Image (cartoon, grey):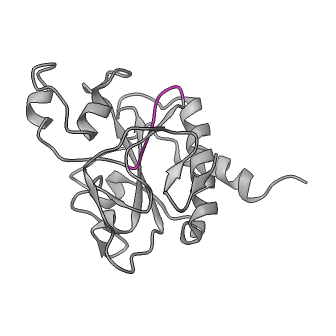
Amino acid sequence: MRVDVATGLLDAALQVPSPNCDERPPGAVVDLILIHGISLPPGEYGGPWIDALFTNRLDPAAHPYFRDIHQFEVSAHLLVRRDGATVQYVPFHRRAWHAGRSNFRGRERCNDFSIGIELEGSDDDPYAAAQYETLRQVICALRRAYPALAAGHLAGHSDVAPGRKSDPGPHFDWLHLQALLARDDNPVV
């Protein structure tokens, strides 16, 4: 996997542009990868609903849950589906609207300096092995493209919006992800 720094696009991702983004503030340095979890409707996987939400096309009549969220203008940079496939909604150099009210180590407005990656999942289910592998590859590609990410700042939505958000949830295996990333940081020769 490779990120084109000029376009902010991941070469392996299906591109589904979201209007829910804007320019980052002048001088903003992207140094945080923020992990989210999403399923639409809650607890269901697959289907067009995440794409529809992030592109402002979610039909409120398609499911009762959608009546409360169809008007939200939200996005993420990237989605990793259960099978490991990736969908990109916002170029990495632009600000996606994924974190909302948030604070990371005393810095508010995490959208300004983070890349938001959604994993298709919920608080109730473990994430798939294919998702961890794809997430590893994506993080490595992002770290190569954006040097400030090499510091390794990773957080969950729940870390930057405690009490308001719970994702990626208790089944997200941070230690497993760290072990996968450590393997890339210390390759066997």
The answer to which quarter of the image holds residue 93 is: bottom left
Nearer to us in this view, 78 or 163 = 78
Q: Is residue 184 left or right of residue 33?
A: right
Q: Nearer the viewer, residue 69 or 173?
A: 69
Task: Measuring from the top left, give residue 133's x and y in whole percent.
Answer: 62, 38
Question: Is residue 37 shown above or below 130?
Answer: below
- Residue 185 point in image, percent of width and height: 72, 59
Does 30 sit above or below residue 37?
below
Asked whether 34 or 73 is in front, the reply is 73
* Residue most extreme to the bottom: 27
Asked if residue 143 lies left or right of residue 53, the reply is right
Q: Residue 77 at x, y = what percent? A: 40, 50
Task: Tell me: residue 81, above or below residue 141.
Answer: above
Residue at horizontal 21 percent and vertical 52 percent from the top: 164
Q: Is residue 50 left or right of residue 183?
A: left
Residue occupying image coordinates x 27% and y 68%: 109
**Residue stretch in magenta:** 77-83
Q: Quadrant of residue 61?
A: top left
Instruction: Point out the image quarter for the C terminus.
Output: bottom right
How many numbered callouts? Answer: 0
Residue 133, relative to residue 73: is it above or below? above
- Residue 79's x, y, as percent? 42, 39
Is 141 displayed left or right of 39 in the figure?
Answer: right
Say whether residue 81 is magenta: yes
Determine which quarter of the picture holds residue 38: top left
Q: Which residue is drawn at the image coordinates 69% and 55% (left, top)?
A: 182
Q: Residue furthest front?
A: 6
Quadrant in which the N terminus appears? top right
Find out whether residue 26 is within the magenta segment.
no
